[in-house]
Amino acid sequence: MPGAADCYPDTLLSVDQARERLLRAVAPVAGIESVALDAADGRVLAQDVVAALSLPPFAQAAMDGYALDHRDVAGVAGPVSLPLSGRVAAGDAPGPLVPGTAVRIFTGAPLPDGADTVLMQEDADLDGDVLLVPPGLAPGRHCRAVGEDIAAGAVALPAGRRMSPAAVALAAALGERTLAVRAPLTVALLSTGNEVRPAGEPLPPGAVHDANGPLLTALLRRLGCRVVPAGIVGDDPAALTATLSSLRADLIVSSGGVSAGEEDHVKTAVAAQGGIDFWRLALKPGKPLAFGHIKGGHVGNTPFLGLPGNPFAAFAAFLALGLPLVQRLSGETIADPPRLTVRCGFTHGRAPGKREYLRVVLRQEGADTVAHLAGAGGSAALSSLALADAVAEVEEARDSLRPGDPLTIIPLHGLF
Protein backbone atom coordinates (compact mmCIF):
# COMPACT_ATOMS: atom_id res chain seq x y z
CA MET A 1 0.00 0.00 0.00
CA PRO A 2 1.42 3.46 -0.85
CA GLY A 3 2.89 5.55 1.96
CA ALA A 4 2.60 9.20 2.82
CA ALA A 5 5.01 10.13 0.05
CA ASP A 6 2.58 8.72 -2.49
CA CYS A 7 -0.32 10.88 -1.34
CA TYR A 8 -2.00 13.02 -4.01
CA PRO A 9 -3.79 15.73 -2.00
CA ASP A 10 -4.75 17.80 -5.03
CA THR A 11 -5.96 14.95 -7.23
CA LEU A 12 -9.72 14.49 -7.54
CA LEU A 13 -10.13 10.81 -8.38
CA SER A 14 -13.15 9.41 -10.13
CA VAL A 15 -15.07 6.73 -8.24
CA ASP A 16 -13.84 4.08 -10.69
CA GLN A 17 -10.21 5.19 -10.36
CA ALA A 18 -10.41 5.22 -6.57
CA ARG A 19 -12.08 1.81 -6.52
CA GLU A 20 -9.35 0.35 -8.73
CA ARG A 21 -6.58 1.77 -6.54
CA LEU A 22 -8.27 0.65 -3.36
CA LEU A 23 -8.74 -2.93 -4.57
CA ARG A 24 -5.15 -3.12 -5.83
CA ALA A 25 -3.89 -2.03 -2.42
CA VAL A 26 -5.50 -4.76 -0.29
CA ALA A 27 -5.89 -8.53 -0.22
CA PRO A 28 -8.14 -10.87 1.76
CA VAL A 29 -7.12 -10.97 5.41
CA ALA A 30 -9.96 -12.96 6.95
CA GLY A 31 -8.85 -16.39 8.15
CA ILE A 32 -10.59 -19.69 7.40
CA GLU A 33 -12.71 -21.73 9.78
CA SER A 34 -15.14 -24.61 9.57
CA VAL A 35 -18.76 -24.07 10.61
CA ALA A 36 -21.81 -26.29 10.81
CA LEU A 37 -24.21 -25.95 7.93
CA ASP A 38 -26.87 -24.29 10.09
CA ALA A 39 -24.39 -21.52 10.98
CA ALA A 40 -23.25 -20.86 7.40
CA ASP A 41 -25.90 -18.36 6.27
CA GLY A 42 -24.28 -14.99 5.57
CA ARG A 43 -20.72 -16.35 5.68
CA VAL A 44 -18.25 -16.16 2.79
CA LEU A 45 -17.15 -19.51 1.37
CA ALA A 46 -13.41 -20.06 1.58
CA GLN A 47 -13.41 -23.17 -0.62
CA ASP A 48 -15.47 -24.39 -3.56
CA VAL A 49 -18.32 -26.72 -2.69
CA VAL A 50 -17.96 -29.54 -5.21
CA ALA A 51 -20.99 -31.75 -5.74
CA ALA A 52 -20.30 -35.17 -4.24
CA LEU A 53 -23.42 -36.52 -5.97
CA SER A 54 -25.72 -35.54 -8.76
CA LEU A 55 -28.99 -33.72 -8.16
CA PRO A 56 -31.31 -35.41 -8.60
CA PRO A 57 -29.28 -38.53 -7.78
CA PHE A 58 -31.72 -40.75 -9.70
CA ALA A 59 -34.30 -40.28 -12.43
CA GLN A 60 -37.56 -39.32 -10.76
CA ALA A 61 -41.13 -38.28 -11.36
CA ALA A 62 -41.85 -34.56 -11.35
CA MET A 63 -45.63 -35.05 -11.00
CA ASP A 64 -48.11 -37.50 -9.53
CA GLY A 65 -49.27 -39.78 -12.36
CA TYR A 66 -48.25 -42.88 -14.27
CA ALA A 67 -44.78 -43.88 -15.47
CA LEU A 68 -44.39 -45.66 -18.78
CA ASP A 69 -42.01 -46.40 -21.64
CA HIS A 70 -42.74 -43.82 -24.34
CA ARG A 71 -42.02 -46.35 -27.08
CA ASP A 72 -45.25 -48.12 -26.12
CA VAL A 73 -47.33 -45.05 -27.13
CA ALA A 74 -45.20 -43.36 -29.81
CA GLY A 75 -46.85 -42.76 -33.16
CA VAL A 76 -50.27 -44.11 -32.15
CA ALA A 77 -53.20 -41.96 -33.27
CA GLY A 78 -55.69 -42.99 -30.59
CA PRO A 79 -55.54 -43.80 -26.89
CA VAL A 80 -53.22 -46.65 -25.88
CA SER A 81 -54.21 -49.14 -23.20
CA LEU A 82 -51.47 -50.11 -20.75
CA PRO A 83 -52.15 -52.46 -17.83
CA LEU A 84 -50.96 -51.22 -14.42
CA SER A 85 -48.19 -53.38 -12.98
CA GLY A 86 -47.22 -51.58 -9.80
CA ARG A 87 -47.06 -48.53 -7.59
CA VAL A 88 -44.01 -46.41 -6.73
CA ALA A 89 -43.94 -43.82 -3.94
CA ALA A 90 -41.13 -41.49 -2.87
CA GLY A 91 -38.48 -43.49 -1.01
CA ASP A 92 -39.30 -46.78 -2.78
CA ALA A 93 -36.71 -48.82 -4.66
CA PRO A 94 -38.73 -50.18 -7.60
CA GLY A 95 -37.82 -53.06 -9.83
CA PRO A 96 -37.72 -52.64 -13.63
CA LEU A 97 -40.87 -51.73 -15.52
CA VAL A 98 -42.67 -54.74 -16.95
CA PRO A 99 -42.64 -54.20 -20.75
CA GLY A 100 -45.95 -52.99 -22.16
CA THR A 101 -47.26 -51.78 -18.77
CA ALA A 102 -47.41 -48.60 -16.68
CA VAL A 103 -47.01 -48.00 -12.95
CA ARG A 104 -48.71 -45.57 -10.60
CA ILE A 105 -46.05 -43.07 -9.45
CA PHE A 106 -45.84 -40.05 -7.14
CA THR A 107 -43.79 -36.84 -7.19
CA GLY A 108 -40.17 -37.44 -6.25
CA ALA A 109 -40.39 -41.22 -6.62
CA PRO A 110 -37.66 -42.97 -8.64
CA LEU A 111 -38.55 -44.02 -12.16
CA PRO A 112 -38.36 -47.79 -12.67
CA ASP A 113 -35.73 -48.90 -15.16
CA GLY A 114 -37.40 -48.90 -18.56
CA ALA A 115 -39.74 -45.98 -17.77
CA ASP A 116 -38.91 -42.58 -19.29
CA THR A 117 -42.18 -40.61 -19.31
CA VAL A 118 -44.91 -39.70 -16.83
CA LEU A 119 -48.53 -39.05 -17.70
CA MET A 120 -49.82 -36.74 -14.99
CA GLN A 121 -52.91 -37.95 -13.20
CA GLU A 122 -55.08 -35.03 -14.40
CA ASP A 123 -54.66 -36.27 -18.00
CA ALA A 124 -55.16 -39.94 -17.21
CA ASP A 125 -58.24 -42.13 -17.70
CA LEU A 126 -58.52 -45.54 -16.07
CA ASP A 127 -60.58 -48.54 -17.06
CA GLY A 128 -60.23 -50.67 -13.98
CA ASP A 129 -56.52 -51.60 -13.81
CA VAL A 130 -55.83 -50.38 -17.33
CA LEU A 131 -54.41 -46.92 -18.09
CA LEU A 132 -55.72 -45.15 -21.18
CA VAL A 133 -52.93 -42.94 -22.55
CA PRO A 134 -54.16 -40.11 -24.81
CA PRO A 135 -52.27 -39.33 -28.01
CA GLY A 136 -49.65 -36.57 -28.11
CA LEU A 137 -47.75 -37.36 -24.89
CA ALA A 138 -44.21 -36.03 -25.36
CA PRO A 139 -41.26 -38.30 -24.50
CA GLY A 140 -39.60 -37.48 -21.17
CA ARG A 141 -42.63 -35.52 -19.99
CA HIS A 142 -42.79 -34.78 -16.23
CA CYS A 143 -39.50 -36.55 -15.50
CA ARG A 144 -36.33 -35.28 -13.83
CA ALA A 145 -33.12 -36.69 -15.25
CA VAL A 146 -30.09 -37.66 -13.16
CA GLY A 147 -27.92 -34.54 -12.69
CA GLU A 148 -30.53 -32.26 -14.24
CA ASP A 149 -29.93 -29.74 -11.46
CA ILE A 150 -26.20 -30.31 -10.98
CA ALA A 151 -23.82 -33.11 -11.99
CA ALA A 152 -21.50 -34.90 -9.57
CA GLY A 153 -18.04 -33.32 -9.66
CA ALA A 154 -19.29 -29.88 -10.71
CA VAL A 155 -18.65 -26.77 -8.60
CA ALA A 156 -21.98 -26.18 -6.94
CA LEU A 157 -20.98 -23.10 -4.92
CA PRO A 158 -17.76 -21.20 -5.73
CA ALA A 159 -15.35 -19.86 -3.15
CA GLY A 160 -15.95 -16.18 -2.49
CA ARG A 161 -19.72 -16.49 -2.55
CA ARG A 162 -21.65 -15.20 0.45
CA MET A 163 -23.99 -17.93 1.60
CA SER A 164 -27.76 -17.40 1.39
CA PRO A 165 -30.61 -19.58 2.64
CA ALA A 166 -30.92 -21.09 -0.85
CA ALA A 167 -27.17 -21.80 -0.97
CA VAL A 168 -27.41 -23.47 2.44
CA ALA A 169 -30.24 -25.63 1.09
CA LEU A 170 -28.14 -26.64 -1.93
CA ALA A 171 -25.20 -27.59 0.29
CA ALA A 172 -27.55 -29.65 2.47
CA ALA A 173 -28.99 -31.45 -0.58
CA LEU A 174 -25.43 -32.35 -1.57
CA GLY A 175 -24.85 -33.90 1.85
CA GLU A 176 -22.52 -31.24 3.30
CA ARG A 177 -22.53 -31.04 7.08
CA THR A 178 -19.84 -28.38 7.51
CA LEU A 179 -18.41 -25.67 5.27
CA ALA A 180 -15.06 -23.88 5.12
CA VAL A 181 -15.81 -20.18 5.44
CA ARG A 182 -13.92 -16.95 6.01
CA ALA A 183 -13.72 -15.72 9.58
CA PRO A 184 -15.71 -12.52 10.21
CA LEU A 185 -13.76 -9.38 9.35
CA THR A 186 -12.93 -7.34 12.45
CA VAL A 187 -13.58 -3.63 11.89
CA ALA A 188 -12.65 -0.92 14.38
CA LEU A 189 -15.10 1.97 14.04
CA LEU A 190 -14.74 5.49 15.42
CA SER A 191 -16.63 8.74 15.03
CA THR A 192 -14.87 12.10 15.28
CA GLY A 193 -15.81 15.65 16.13
CA ASN A 194 -16.01 17.89 19.19
CA GLU A 195 -19.72 18.32 18.57
CA VAL A 196 -20.57 14.58 18.49
CA ARG A 197 -22.21 12.88 21.48
CA PRO A 198 -23.53 9.32 21.92
CA ALA A 199 -27.24 8.83 21.34
CA GLY A 200 -29.21 9.26 24.54
CA GLU A 201 -26.82 11.67 26.22
CA PRO A 202 -27.93 15.25 26.92
CA LEU A 203 -26.84 17.65 24.20
CA PRO A 204 -25.00 20.82 25.19
CA PRO A 205 -25.32 23.83 22.86
CA GLY A 206 -23.83 23.12 19.43
CA ALA A 207 -23.71 19.34 19.90
CA VAL A 208 -25.39 16.55 17.90
CA HIS A 209 -25.98 12.87 18.51
CA ASP A 210 -23.74 10.39 16.71
CA ALA A 211 -25.72 8.97 13.78
CA ASN A 212 -22.76 7.75 11.72
CA GLY A 213 -21.60 5.24 14.32
CA PRO A 214 -24.92 3.34 14.42
CA LEU A 215 -25.34 3.71 10.63
CA LEU A 216 -21.93 2.24 9.82
CA THR A 217 -22.20 -0.41 12.54
CA ALA A 218 -25.43 -1.66 10.99
CA LEU A 219 -23.98 -1.65 7.46
CA LEU A 220 -20.83 -3.49 8.52
CA ARG A 221 -22.74 -6.08 10.53
CA ARG A 222 -24.99 -6.77 7.57
CA LEU A 223 -21.82 -7.53 5.63
CA GLY A 224 -20.85 -10.10 8.24
CA CYS A 225 -18.25 -7.97 10.05
CA ARG A 226 -17.46 -7.99 13.75
CA VAL A 227 -17.53 -4.33 14.76
CA VAL A 228 -15.24 -3.11 17.54
CA PRO A 229 -16.51 0.30 18.74
CA ALA A 230 -13.66 2.78 19.20
CA GLY A 231 -15.94 5.51 20.53
CA ILE A 232 -16.03 9.19 19.68
CA VAL A 233 -12.79 11.15 19.43
CA GLY A 234 -12.76 14.94 19.47
CA ASP A 235 -10.93 17.18 17.01
CA ASP A 236 -7.63 16.72 18.79
CA PRO A 237 -4.57 15.50 16.80
CA ALA A 238 -2.92 13.88 19.83
CA ALA A 239 -6.10 12.05 20.86
CA LEU A 240 -6.68 10.86 17.29
CA THR A 241 -3.10 9.64 16.99
CA ALA A 242 -3.32 7.78 20.30
CA THR A 243 -6.64 6.16 19.42
CA LEU A 244 -5.60 5.11 15.91
CA SER A 245 -2.32 3.61 17.13
CA SER A 246 -4.14 1.57 19.79
CA LEU A 247 -6.63 -0.13 17.46
CA ARG A 248 -6.17 -3.79 16.51
CA ALA A 249 -8.42 -4.81 13.64
CA ASP A 250 -8.51 -6.01 10.04
CA LEU A 251 -9.86 -2.62 8.97
CA ILE A 252 -10.25 0.78 10.63
CA VAL A 253 -13.17 2.97 9.59
CA SER A 254 -13.82 6.52 10.81
CA SER A 255 -16.33 9.22 9.99
CA GLY A 256 -15.69 12.96 9.98
CA GLY A 257 -12.52 15.01 10.07
CA VAL A 258 -11.26 14.15 6.56
CA SER A 259 -11.93 17.45 4.79
CA ALA A 260 -9.54 20.41 4.48
CA GLY A 261 -10.73 22.51 7.43
CA GLU A 262 -8.60 23.64 10.35
CA GLU A 263 -10.35 21.14 12.64
CA ASP A 264 -10.03 18.19 10.23
CA HIS A 265 -7.13 16.18 11.65
CA VAL A 266 -7.87 12.58 10.66
CA LYS A 267 -5.91 12.30 7.43
CA THR A 268 -2.91 14.07 9.01
CA ALA A 269 -2.92 11.59 11.90
CA VAL A 270 -3.19 8.64 9.52
CA ALA A 271 -0.44 9.96 7.24
CA ALA A 272 1.88 10.37 10.23
CA GLN A 273 1.36 6.75 11.31
CA GLY A 274 1.28 5.07 7.94
CA GLY A 275 0.12 6.68 4.74
CA ILE A 276 -2.73 8.23 2.79
CA ASP A 277 -3.25 6.94 -0.73
CA PHE A 278 -6.04 9.35 -1.72
CA TRP A 279 -8.55 11.63 -0.02
CA ARG A 280 -10.54 13.56 -2.63
CA LEU A 281 -13.22 11.79 -4.63
CA ALA A 282 -15.29 12.98 -7.59
CA LEU A 283 -18.46 11.99 -5.74
CA LYS A 284 -21.41 14.10 -4.57
CA PRO A 285 -21.89 13.86 -1.67
CA GLY A 286 -18.75 12.17 -0.41
CA LYS A 287 -15.88 14.19 -1.88
CA PRO A 288 -13.66 14.14 1.25
CA LEU A 289 -12.74 10.48 1.72
CA ALA A 290 -9.40 9.23 3.05
CA PHE A 291 -8.00 5.84 2.16
CA GLY A 292 -4.68 4.70 3.51
CA HIS A 293 -3.12 2.51 6.20
CA ILE A 294 -1.89 2.47 9.76
CA LYS A 295 1.46 0.75 10.39
CA GLY A 296 1.48 -2.17 12.79
CA GLY A 297 -1.51 -4.06 14.09
CA HIS A 298 -2.05 -7.80 13.89
CA VAL A 299 -2.28 -7.71 10.09
CA GLY A 300 0.81 -5.56 9.58
CA ASN A 301 -0.39 -2.46 7.73
CA THR A 302 -4.03 -2.06 8.67
CA PRO A 303 -6.21 -0.54 5.92
CA PHE A 304 -7.93 2.70 6.90
CA LEU A 305 -11.07 4.22 5.41
CA GLY A 306 -12.04 7.72 6.53
CA LEU A 307 -15.59 8.66 5.56
CA PRO A 308 -17.19 12.13 5.52
CA GLY A 309 -19.02 13.42 8.58
CA ASN A 310 -22.44 14.15 7.08
CA PRO A 311 -24.55 10.99 7.30
CA PHE A 312 -25.66 10.67 3.68
CA ALA A 313 -22.18 11.57 2.48
CA ALA A 314 -20.82 8.80 4.71
CA PHE A 315 -23.42 6.39 3.33
CA ALA A 316 -22.70 7.35 -0.30
CA ALA A 317 -18.95 7.01 0.14
CA PHE A 318 -19.40 3.65 1.88
CA LEU A 319 -21.61 2.45 -0.97
CA ALA A 320 -19.03 3.53 -3.55
CA LEU A 321 -15.86 2.30 -1.83
CA GLY A 322 -16.56 0.78 1.58
CA LEU A 323 -18.62 -2.06 0.16
CA PRO A 324 -15.97 -3.34 -2.31
CA LEU A 325 -13.24 -2.81 0.32
CA VAL A 326 -15.05 -5.03 2.84
CA GLN A 327 -15.75 -7.60 0.13
CA ARG A 328 -12.07 -7.78 -0.81
CA LEU A 329 -10.80 -8.02 2.76
CA SER A 330 -13.45 -10.65 3.58
CA GLY A 331 -12.44 -12.84 0.65
CA GLU A 332 -15.81 -12.28 -1.00
CA THR A 333 -16.05 -12.08 -4.77
CA ILE A 334 -16.30 -8.40 -5.70
CA ALA A 335 -19.74 -7.70 -7.10
CA ASP A 336 -21.20 -4.39 -8.20
CA PRO A 337 -24.58 -3.59 -6.66
CA PRO A 338 -27.46 -4.45 -9.01
CA ARG A 339 -28.70 -1.51 -11.04
CA LEU A 340 -32.06 -0.92 -12.68
CA THR A 341 -33.28 1.69 -15.14
CA VAL A 342 -36.48 3.56 -14.25
CA ARG A 343 -38.12 6.82 -15.28
CA CYS A 344 -37.11 10.07 -13.61
CA GLY A 345 -39.97 11.91 -11.94
CA PHE A 346 -38.23 15.18 -11.05
CA THR A 347 -36.05 18.00 -12.36
CA HIS A 348 -32.46 18.22 -11.19
CA GLY A 349 -29.76 20.54 -12.51
CA ARG A 350 -26.10 19.79 -11.91
CA ALA A 351 -22.58 20.50 -13.04
CA PRO A 352 -20.97 17.55 -14.84
CA GLY A 353 -17.77 16.00 -13.54
CA LYS A 354 -18.84 14.08 -10.44
CA ARG A 355 -20.85 10.95 -9.87
CA GLU A 356 -23.87 11.91 -7.81
CA TYR A 357 -26.15 9.90 -5.57
CA LEU A 358 -29.72 11.01 -4.89
CA ARG A 359 -32.21 9.44 -2.48
CA VAL A 360 -35.39 8.38 -4.26
CA VAL A 361 -38.69 6.65 -3.61
CA LEU A 362 -40.24 4.48 -6.32
CA ARG A 363 -43.84 4.64 -7.50
CA GLN A 364 -45.65 2.62 -10.12
CA GLU A 365 -47.29 5.03 -12.54
CA GLY A 366 -49.09 3.12 -15.26
CA ALA A 367 -46.61 0.78 -16.94
CA ASP A 368 -43.57 2.70 -15.64
CA THR A 369 -41.64 2.64 -12.40
CA VAL A 370 -40.92 6.29 -11.61
CA ALA A 371 -38.32 7.65 -9.18
CA HIS A 372 -39.13 10.72 -7.08
CA LEU A 373 -36.85 12.54 -4.68
CA ALA A 374 -37.30 11.11 -1.18
CA GLY A 375 -37.24 14.42 0.68
CA ALA A 376 -34.62 16.82 1.95
CA GLY A 377 -31.57 16.55 -0.27
CA GLY A 378 -28.77 17.86 1.95
CA SER A 379 -25.90 15.52 2.78
CA ALA A 380 -26.74 15.81 6.49
CA ALA A 381 -30.42 14.87 6.02
CA LEU A 382 -31.25 11.44 7.44
CA SER A 383 -35.03 11.32 7.05
CA SER A 384 -34.81 11.09 3.26
CA LEU A 385 -32.26 8.28 3.50
CA ALA A 386 -34.47 6.39 5.94
CA LEU A 387 -37.45 6.74 3.57
CA ALA A 388 -35.58 5.97 0.34
CA ASP A 389 -36.27 2.85 -1.70
CA ALA A 390 -33.16 3.34 -3.82
CA VAL A 391 -30.22 5.57 -4.60
CA ALA A 392 -30.26 7.20 -8.03
CA GLU A 393 -26.80 7.10 -9.60
CA VAL A 394 -26.17 10.06 -11.87
CA GLU A 395 -23.23 9.53 -14.22
CA GLU A 396 -20.32 11.97 -14.27
CA ALA A 397 -21.03 13.36 -17.75
CA ARG A 398 -24.72 14.04 -17.22
CA ASP A 399 -25.66 17.72 -16.84
CA SER A 400 -29.34 17.54 -15.87
CA LEU A 401 -32.30 15.32 -15.11
CA ARG A 402 -35.83 15.95 -16.35
CA PRO A 403 -39.13 14.11 -15.85
CA GLY A 404 -39.32 11.13 -18.18
CA ASP A 405 -35.55 10.71 -18.56
CA PRO A 406 -34.11 7.22 -18.02
CA LEU A 407 -32.49 7.02 -14.61
CA THR A 408 -30.15 4.42 -13.12
CA ILE A 409 -30.99 3.34 -9.59
CA ILE A 410 -29.40 1.05 -7.01
CA PRO A 411 -32.21 -0.55 -4.97
CA LEU A 412 -31.45 -0.45 -1.26
CA HIS A 413 -33.58 -3.41 -0.18
CA GLY A 414 -31.28 -6.38 0.29
CA LEU A 415 -28.17 -4.46 -0.80
CA PHE A 416 -26.41 -4.90 2.54
Image: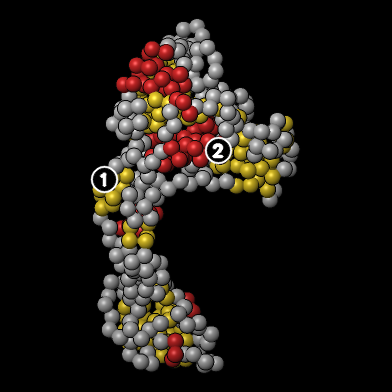
Q: Is residue 249 above or below residue 29?
A: above
Q: Residue 180 or 141: which is nearer the viewer?
A: 180
Q: Residue 230 or 329: which is nearer the viewer?
A: 329
Name the residue rendered at 48%, 47% in the picture. 335
Q: Is residue 216 above or below residue 70?
A: above
Q: Residue 27 or 192: which is nearer the viewer?
A: 27
The kind of secondary structure element at disc 1 is strand
Q: Find residue 251 and report its image quarter.
A: top left
Gap in angstroms between the C-alphas marked 2 and 1: 34 Å
Badge 2 is on which residue? 17
Name the residue rendered at 32%, 24% in the picture. 247
Does 412 sit left or right of 250 as displayed? right
Badge 1 is on which residue? 33
The kind of secondary structure element at disc 2 is helix
Name the residue rendered at 33%, 49% in the picture. 46
Q: Residue 290 or 158: which is nearer the viewer?
A: 290
Q: Is residue 179 above or below residue 77?
A: above
Q: In which quadrant of the rendered image does the N terminus lie?
A: top left
Q: Amino acid at mark 1?
A: Glu
Q: Tell me residue 192's x, y (percent).
A: 44, 18
Does 406 sit left or right of 259 as displayed? right
Q: Amino acid at mark 2?
A: Gln
- Tag in front: 2 or 1: 2
Name the residue rendered at 41%, 87% in the picture. 69
